[in-house]
Image (cartoon, helix red, strand yellow):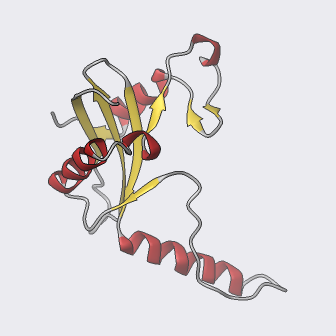
């Protein structure tokens, strides 16, 4: 069971009129850091259109709209802070938080690796994202 959350960082998009995805990093009271991607339905539609566009340009490929999400994504109605925080609270209450958020490990053996079985390898990765990409908002 996940302990109480200490901080939630949400990626801020300044270049998109209506952002359709964002990275979210959370830190627990025990200083564990987790990350996940939140998306909206327009994100899925955009991915489907991209796959269709690519398939129309390749020989011997049948044009079709589809989306493949390789890592866990949380689909929400909008990317407002309240929506994301309420969703995180619900995921914790339903005990499924750790199935959609990836734990950022502190294992010293993996300091020089970037991934491990699809998971982030070091807290340094999260630190860079927190300081360089996300807007820190208590």
> Residue 79: percent from the left, percent from the top?
25, 59
Q: Quadrant of the N terminus?
A: top left
At 70% from the left edge and 82% from the top edge, which residue is drawn? 55
What is the number of callouts on the image?
A: 0
**Frontmost residue, 91 versus 52:** 91
Quadrant of the image occupied by residue 80:
bottom left
Relative to the observer, which residue lies in front, 87 or 92? 92
Q: Residue furthest right?
A: 60
Give the image location of residue 11, x and y in percent: 31, 46
- The residue under the point 37% across, 23% down is 32
Q: What residue appears at the point 62 percent right and 19 percent down from the top-left corner?
A: 110
Position of 83 with respect to 119 (left or right) is left
Q: Residue at x 53, y 81 (%)?
A: 49
Q: Judge by depth and name the residue closer to the eye, 37 or 124.
A: 37
- What x and y, as percent, mark residue 86? 19, 51
Q: Nearer the viewer, residue 128 or 74?
A: 74
Residue 94's spot in the image, x, y percent?
Answer: 30, 47
* Viewport quadrant of the C terminus: top left
């Amino acid at each position: 069971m996940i302990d109480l959350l200490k901080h939630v960082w949400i990626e801020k998009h300044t270049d998109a009129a209506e952002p359709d995805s964002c990275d979210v990093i959370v830190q627990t009271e025990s200083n564990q850091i987790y990350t996940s991607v939140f998306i909206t339905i327009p994100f899925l539609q955009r991915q489907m259109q991209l796959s269709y566009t690519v398939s129309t340009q390749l020989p011997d490929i049948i044009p079709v709209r589809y989306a493949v999400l390789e890592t866990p994504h949380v689909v929400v109605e909008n990317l407002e802070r309240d929506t994301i925080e309420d969703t995180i609270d619900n995921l914790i209450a339903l005990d499924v938080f750790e199935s959609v958020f990836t734990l950022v490990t502190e294992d010293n053996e993996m300091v020089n690796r970037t991934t491990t079985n699809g998971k982030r390898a070091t807290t340094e990765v999260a630190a860079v994202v927190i300081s360089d990409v996300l807007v820190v908002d208590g």
